[in-house]
């Protein structure tokens, strides 16, 4: 289940970024984020059981998310014609606070499950700790290693690339929703209710 989630996450990254270098950098972030989690699990005497694997499976997308955000912003700076090292530094500084805030928000969601009382607490302690360790590990990878690797491996593409089919479809849906705001709000309210 963990492997399938990782493979699907990498495929989705490739479909949206359409750059094999960016995809590889995002894919590398996954094992680099999981390795420290395994170390903490070992030190806490947790086994690879259904609960810890569930936690890792749930955070697979989150683990690559920080790296994807960093890489996408670096790619945007590269399209402006900047040198890879400058693009990596400026892009990482530009979104640093947002990535950090997102990470700590996710930790604040997962960590309380580790402190539940009773029988559920015994079961979910490993879940909460595993997820709450994996997410900050991905932050460290995204803030330190991803920009460094991007500076060396990503190439400048100063020409504006044409948007892919998925992006064009997305943009047309957003434009239609913005032109029909009342209808969009009504449909959203009906779906949420």
Image (tube, rainbow, N blue to C red):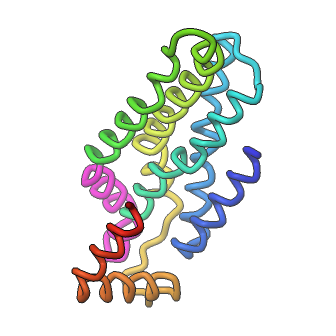
Residue depicted at 33% across the width and 39% down the height = 100
Q: Which residues are magenta?
A: 75-95
Question: Would you place residue 184 above or below residue 150 in this image?
Answer: below
Q: Left or right? Give the position of 185 relative to 8.
A: left
Residue depicted at 52% across the width and 10% down the height = 117
Would residue 93 be counted in the magenta stretch?
yes
Tell which of 28 and 193 is nearer to you.
Answer: 193
Q: Position of residue 40 (x, y in %)?
A: 61, 18
Mostly what secondary structure, the magenta segment? helix
Q: Left or right? Give the position of 19 relative to 189.
A: right
Q: Position of residue 133 (x, y in %)?
A: 52, 26
Tell which of 96 and 153 is nearer to you.
Answer: 96
Question: Would you place residue 19 above or below residue 128 in this image?
Answer: below
Residue depicted at 36% across the width and 34% down the height = 104
Residue depicted at 50% across the width and 65% down the height = 154
Would residue 145 be counted in the magenta stretch?
no
Give residue 157's quadrant in the image: bottom left
């Amino acid at each position: 289940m963990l492997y399938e989630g990782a493979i699907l996450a990498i495929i989705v990254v490739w479909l949206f970024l359409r750059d094999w270098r960016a995809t590889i950098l995002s894919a590398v972030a996954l094992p680099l984020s999981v390795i420290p989690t395994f170390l903490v699990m070992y030190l806490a005497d947790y086994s690879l059981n259904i609960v810890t694997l569930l936690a890792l499976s749930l955070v697979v997308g989150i683990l690559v998310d920080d790296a994807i955000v960093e890489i996408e912003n670096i790619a945007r700076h590269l399209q402006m014609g900047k040198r890879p090292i400058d693009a990596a530094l400026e892009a990482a500084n530009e979104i640093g606070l947002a990535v950090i805030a997102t990470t700590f928000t996710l930790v604040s969601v997962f960590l309380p499950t580790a402190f539940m009382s009773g029988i559920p607490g015994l079961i979910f302690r490993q879940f909460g700790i595993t997820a709450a360790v994996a997410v900050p590990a991905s932050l460290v990878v995204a803030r330190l290693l991803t920009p460094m690797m991007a500076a060396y491996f990503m190439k400048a593409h100063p020409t504006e690339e044409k948007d892919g089919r998925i992006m064009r479809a997305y943009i047309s849906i957003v434009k239609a929703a913005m032109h029909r705001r009342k209808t969009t709000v009504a449909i959203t309210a009906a779906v949420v209710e």
